[in-house]
Image: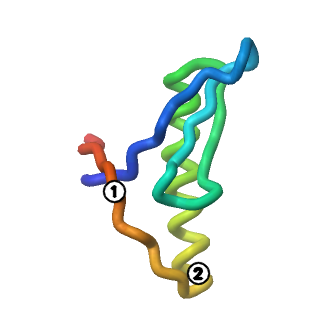
Amino acid sequence: MVSFAPILSREGNDGFIARVPDLPGCMSDGDTPEEAVRNAYDAIEAWIEAAEDHGRKVPPPARSIEKR
C-alpha cells in the first residue's frame, strides 16, 4: 500500500510534529518520533475521509512510502 509520507520535526522540548505537506493542514504530534508518525497516519486517514465526504479531490502524494 502506498501512503503519504509525513515530515517529522522536533518542537523544542515538547515533542515532535509530523506534517503531511501534500495534504494542507494535515499534521499530528507525539511525545516520540514514532508516536508522531503513528498519529500522522490516523490524521491522513481522517483527512482523506473528510475530503471524500465533501466531494473534494485527494491529491496524489508527491513523495510516498511503502506502508506494510
Quadrant of the rendered image containing residue 36: top right
Mark 1 or 2 closer to N-term?
Answer: 2
Question: Quick one: 46 or 21, which is closer to the camera?
Answer: 21
Quadrant of the rendered image containing residue 18: top right
Expressed as whole percent of the image width and height from the top left, the position of residue 46 reads: 58, 60
Quick one: quadrant of the C terminus?
top left
- At horizontal 24% and vertical 44% (from top left) the residue drawn is 66
Left or right: 48 with respect to 61? right
| Residue 13, above or below 44 | above
The chosen color scheme is: rainbow
Quadrant of the rendered image containing residue 47: bottom right
Q: Secondary structure at mark 2?
A: helix
| Residue 25, above or below 16 | below
Label 1–label 2 contact, CB within 8 A: no
Left or right: 51 with respect to 57? right
Residue type, mark 1 in image: Ala
Q: Secondary structure at mark 1?
A: loop
Expressed as whole percent of the image width and height from the top left, the position of residue 41 reads: 49, 46
Expressed as whole percent of the image width and height from the top left, the position of residue 64 reads: 30, 49
Question: Quick one: 17 or 38, which is closer to the camera?
Answer: 17
Q: Label 1 crowding class (10 Å Cα cut-off): few <14, some 14-19, many 20+?
A: few
Marker count (numbered): 2
Residue type, mark 2 in image: Asp
Residue indicated by mark 2: 53
Residue furthest out toward the bottom: 55
Residue indicated by mark 1: 62
